[in-house]
Amino acid sequence: MTAGRAAVLDTGAFTVSDVDYGDPGRDEVLVRLVASGLCHTDLAVVAGGIPFPAPGVIGHEGAGVVERVGHGVTEVAPGDKVLLSFTSCGGCAACAADHPAYCETWLPRNLLGALRQDDAGTITRDGRRIAGHFFGQSSFGTFAIADRRSLVKVAPEADLTALAPLGCGVLTGFGSMWNVLDPGPADVVAVYGAGAVGLSGVIAASLRAPARLIAIDLVAARLELARELGATDVIDAGTEDVAARLAEITAGHGVDLSFDTTGNPGVARGALDAAAIRGTVLVCGAPPPGTEIAVDIQGILTGKVLRGVTMGDARPQQLIPQLVALHAEGRLPLERLERAYELEEIAQAAEDMHLGRTVKPVIVF
């Protein structure tokens, strides 16, 4: 056992507690965490929208140093710096085709913390086992017992605190734009929601230099940041008529590529209505199960596409090193999005993120 501390989720609230971490099992690694990003998916679990069992440890943007490795792990060794992302089975058709975000067992492995080996490492509090293995890691603590498939090794000089959010929020936003929407120089692109995911999408799109890049949000400071990160136009959805402004900006053409990061079905429907002929609306986010988007069939007969995406359709071991390189070159300014919080401040970090005071909280250990 390894003694540590973790923000344990107890029926809708975090309790920072002393916990013990078991030895890593086959294909697992014990990681001493340096930092972990806080993501809207974590907030959805806290709010009860995702059925992760409590008490338990969540968190899924971990960054740290390998402490011990379990049987079968050869990719990393003690002392290696790693970033943690989602896990997958590695054997289904989607994983074999390099689309692990669409793993056939993605939901139970990541959101429910299930499907583990018999010898898997466990987390206990006061001698009682608590839930863990969220996204193959559960990183809101001083250690994580992580799946080998969630690990991405980085250089010894890597700034783990700055890079922690690459595991989910930045990966999702950047990957969705880079891998799926793939804008070209003639495209009009709109990003709905200027949080960490949306702003990562703005950065990715700006690197492709589309004809127009429009950011839409309710928070003026985030819209100003979006403009600084490459948006050519911004729309304040709280004070402006979004549909009218999009029609004005596009001269009635409509939006070629839309990325809705809000998880709000009304926003997605508005994006679909504003889409150009043969336009695409890409939707991510984690609204409660059963949330539906109303679609006017007549409205999509012009070739419009409504598409969902998970984790930017990315393979972490491929995209994350590219993101690390872009950060090193100054083209992925993660620090512009981040604010650091101590573990004991995690409830404040969650509140600040929910209220829009912080784009991307990073919990430091």
Image: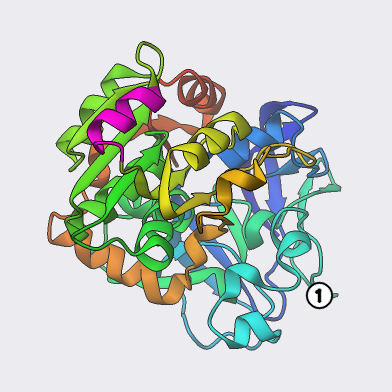
The residue at the point 57 percent across, 36 percent down is 269
Helix, strand or loop for disc 1: loop
Q: Is residue 281 magenta?
A: no
* Vertical relation: 314 (above or below) 327: below
Q: Which residues are magenta?
A: 242-252
The residue at the point 77 percent across, 30 percent down is 10
Query: Within 10 Å of the Cα at label 1, are there few (<14), some (14-19), or many (20+) other Cα atoms?
Result: some
Q: Is residue 141 shown to the viewer in this render?
A: no
18 displayed left or right of 185: right
Q: Position of residue 333 (x, y in %)?
A: 21, 47
Residue that carries the numbered disc 1 in the rendered image: 119
* Vertical relation: 353 (above or below) 37: above
Q: Is residue 248 magenta?
A: yes
Q: Is residue 310 shown to the viewer in this render?
A: yes
At label 1, the amino acid type is: Asp
- The mark tally for this picture is 1
* Vertical relation: 274 (above or below) 183: above
Which quarter of the rendering shows the N terminus? bottom right
Quadrant of the image occupied by residue 82: bottom left
Q: Position of residue 162 (x, y in %)?
A: 30, 48
The residue at the point 27 percent across, 46 percent down is 334
Most foreground residue, 223 or 122: 223
Q: Main secondary structure of the magenta part?
A: helix
